[in-house]
Amino acid sequence: MLKKGGEVQNLAIQKIWRKTEAKSQRVIRRGRGSDEDRQDVRQEATMLLYLAIQQERFRGKTDAELIAFYNQTFLFVWMDRVRKRDQMPMNVLEEYSGPIDQSVEEILIQLEIETKAKRKLEECLKKLDEKGVKIIKWRYFEVPPFSWEEIAQRLAYNTAQTAQNKGGKGMKQLRICMGG
């Protein structure tokens, strides 16, 4: 239901939130969190669940599997926030009745890494000139990628080699900014 988008997606999210409301409140309360914390964690967990489904990393079939995945995601996000605040209360874990599924944890860590990488990429692209950004997006992010001839034509360069040189310069600046 989450893949369908629009109203169906909103209904699915509301259903998940209703079914996990009491548990999420207890987890946050035991971790000395506020209602605002719960709302923030709820939204972040929902976003991660949505991304996992969209990227076909969550393969569960039933509502129970979806709810379990969401609960684990919620707990993982909350524990991460508490850990970052150096307030890891031991009784947060009492609410959860089993080990965190390794695959869930791996998926969430990967999604967090990818999200951070995308933010870093966006920051670095903002530092490049407008034509450099266009070249990189057209050549490396479009499917199928634009040819150097098409890029040269769109940007009114005399030759494809000019577009390729400008693209190479932009990629070099991007690599430096990204730290590699």
Image (tube, rainbow, N blue to C red):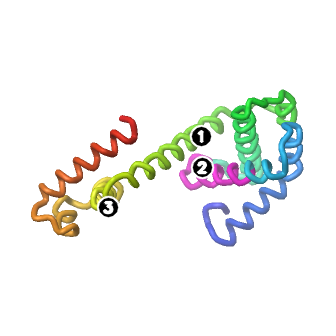
Mark 1 or 2 closer to N-term? 2
Residue 157 numbered tag = none
- Asked whether the residues under the numbered discs 3 and 2 touch, taking CB atoms below 8 Å apart as contact, a structural biologist would say no
Q: Is residue 176 above or below residue 51?
A: above
Judged left or right of residue 70, residue 142 is left
Image spot of residue 43 (x, y percent): 71, 54
The nearer-to-camera label among 3 and 2 is: 3
Q: Is 64 or 10 nearer to us in this picture?
A: 10
- Asked whether the residues under the numbered discs 1 and 2 touch, taking CB atoms below 8 Å apart as contact, a structural biologist would say yes
Which amino acid is tagged 2?
Answer: Ala
Judged left or right of residue 5, residue 173 is left
Secondary-structure class at tag 3 = helix
Q: How many marks?
A: 3
- Image: magenta residue range: 42-58
State the image quarter where residue 177 is shown: top left
The residue under label 3 is: 130
Mark yes or no: residue 123 visible. yes
Mark 3 or 2 closer to N-term? 2
The residue under label 1 is: 107
Secondary-structure class at tag 2 = helix
Category of crowding for the residue at label 3, using alpha-carbon neighbours closer than 10 angstroms: few (below 14), some (14–19), many (at least 20) = few
Which amino acid is tagged 1?
Answer: Ile
The residue under label 2 is: 52
How far apart in space, not on screen, are marks 3 and 2 (Cα)?
32 Å
Which amino acid is tagged 3?
Answer: Glu
Q: Is 97 or 26 nearer to us in this picture?
A: 26
User: Which quarter shows the C terminus?
Assistant: top left
Residue drawn where x is 89% and y is 43% of the image: 26
Image spot of residue 83 (x, y percent): 72, 32
Residue drawn where x is 65% and y is 51% of the image: 49
Q: Is residue 64 above or below residue 7?
A: above
